[in-house]
Image: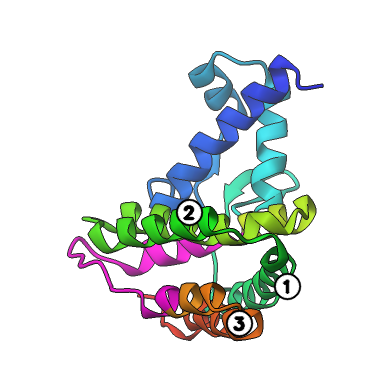
Amino acid sequence: MTTTKDTLAARISKVLADRIIAGALEPGSRLGQDHIAEEFGASHVPVREAFRRLEAQGLVVSEPRRGVRVAGFSLDEVREVAEMRAALEALALRNAFPHMTKAILDQAEEANRAGDRARDVKAWEQANRSFHRIILTPCGMPRLLKAIDDLHTASARFLFSGWRAEWEAPTDRDHRAILDALRAGQSEIAASVLARHVQTIGQKKLK
């Protein structure tokens, strides 16, 4: 049963995650429990729970006598997340394939078009994440999907750190190839393209 404290903790962690991902809270920044509790009109209990959720996502680190700070990241971590996403998303897609419908694929098609129309990196990332979530959710494996969602959050942070103010939405040919393979009933080709597609984020240099 979801309690009010659980709901508040989820809201606090979501707001803080958005700030960290967008770079408003930089690596090494200290997150003051008192300050955040005051901002959200909350007690320390949901704030501590929010910190635990952020730590599970790899967005903050808790250090003895130093409190909670925004986590940094290295190129090795970017590559690790890419490798993990490639393996887990391919697994999810293989399990989702038997439950794939035309309606689901049409929905994914629209998410892909939204990415093509994106005017900034944030809108593109949301459309990209939506595309992946739509084609993977039919796997019906909630723990796997939760792990993938956490990895997407990390990927978004890497992506945002690498882009400046100028932005031009890329045309995602891999998404098109994945959709074509799924519509043709070629699940292994779709999973292979998806894994390769996700691994490309680990090959980009941090700016």
**Label 3 neighbour load within 10 Å: few <14, some 14-19, many 20+:** some
- Between 139 and 203, which is closer to the camera in this rendering? 139
The C terminus lies in quadrant: bottom left
Three-letter code, disc 2: Ser
Q: Which residue is mark 1?
A: 91
Quarter holding residue 4: top right
Q: Visible in this render: residue 104? A: yes
Q: Which residue is mark 3?
A: 186
Q: Which residue is mark 2?
A: 130
Secondary structure beneath label 2: helix
Q: Mark 2 vs mark 1: which is more N-terminal?
A: 1
Three-letter code, disc 1: Leu
Task: Please provide percent x and percent y for residue 54.
Answer: 64, 45
Secondary structure beneath label 3: loop
Tell us which disc is closer to us: 2 or 3: 3
Q: Which residues are magenta?
A: 151-176
Three-letter code, disc 3: Gln
Q: Is residue 151 left or right of residue 115?
A: right
Q: Give the Cα separation between the discs numbered 2 and 1.
A: 18 Å
Task: Please provide percent x and percent y for residue 119.
Answer: 21, 55
Task: Please provide percent x and percent y for residue 123.
Answer: 32, 52
- Between 126 and 154, which is closer to the camera in this rendering? 126
**Label 2 neighbour load within 10 Å: few <14, some 14-19, many 20+:** some
Up the image or down, 203 lies above or below 158; here it is below
Residue farthest toward the right in the current orientation of the protein: 1
The N terminus lies in quadrant: top right
Q: Give the Cα separation between the discs numbered 1 and 3.
A: 15 Å
Q: Residue at x 75, y 59 (%)?
A: 144
Task: Please provide percent x and percent y for residue 2.
Answer: 76, 22
Q: Is residue 160 left or right of residue 108?
A: left
